[in-house]
Amino acid sequence: MSDITVYTTSWCPFCHRLLIDLDRAGIEFEDIDIEETPAAAAVVEGFNRGNRTVPTVVFQDGSGMTNPDVSQVLAKLGR
């Protein structure tokens, strides 16, 4: 099971950086491209007042962060 779900797009440099950093930190994640999965875009919009802002990270407790750095994700995960 993944620690988090990261909503991204293929063209977003902030998304690519976060995914690399998460991988280096050993955090298990599911990466969902909102342009390939239309229902995922609705999830992102729900966290971002109707905007499709990525990366959006959703945690197992249902909370989310928009465009966090890896240290913020680690802190939320208690690591």
Image (spheres, helix red, strand yellow):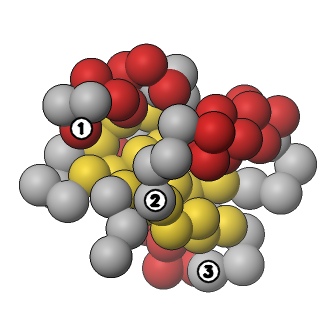
Question: Would you call the spot at circle 3 few (<14 residues within 10 Å), some (14-19), or many (20 or more)?
Answer: few
Residue 43 sits in quarter: bottom left
- The residue under the point 45% across, 49% down is 27
- Locate residue 67, reporting x and y percent: 53, 29
Considering the image in quadrants, where does the C terminus appear?
top left
The three-letter code of the residue at mark 2 reads Glu
| Whole-number angstrom distance, CA of label 3 to CA of label 2 | 20 Å
| Whole-number angstrom distance, CA of label 2 to CA of label 1 | 11 Å
Residue 47 sits in quarter: top left
- Please indicate whether residue 3 sits to the left or right of residue 42 in the image: left
SS of the residue at dot 3?
loop
Foreground disc of the pair 3, 1: 1
Earlier residue among tags 2 and 1: 2
The three-letter code of the residue at mark 3 reads Thr
The three-letter code of the residue at mark 1 reads Leu
SS of the residue at dot 2?
loop
Asked whether disc 3 touches disc 2, contact meaning CB atoms under 8 Å apart, the reply is no
The residue tagged 2 is: 28
- Please indicate whether residue 43 sits to the left or right of residue 23 in the image: left
- The residue under the point 50% across, 47% down is 26
Earlier residue among tags 3 and 2: 2
Up/down of 41 relative to 11, above or below:
below
Up/down of 61 relative to 78, above or below:
below
Earlier residue among tags 3 and 1: 3
The residue tagged 3 is: 37
- Locate residue 22, reporting x and y percent: 56, 41
Q: Could you say which is closer to the camera, residue 16 or residue 45?
A: 16
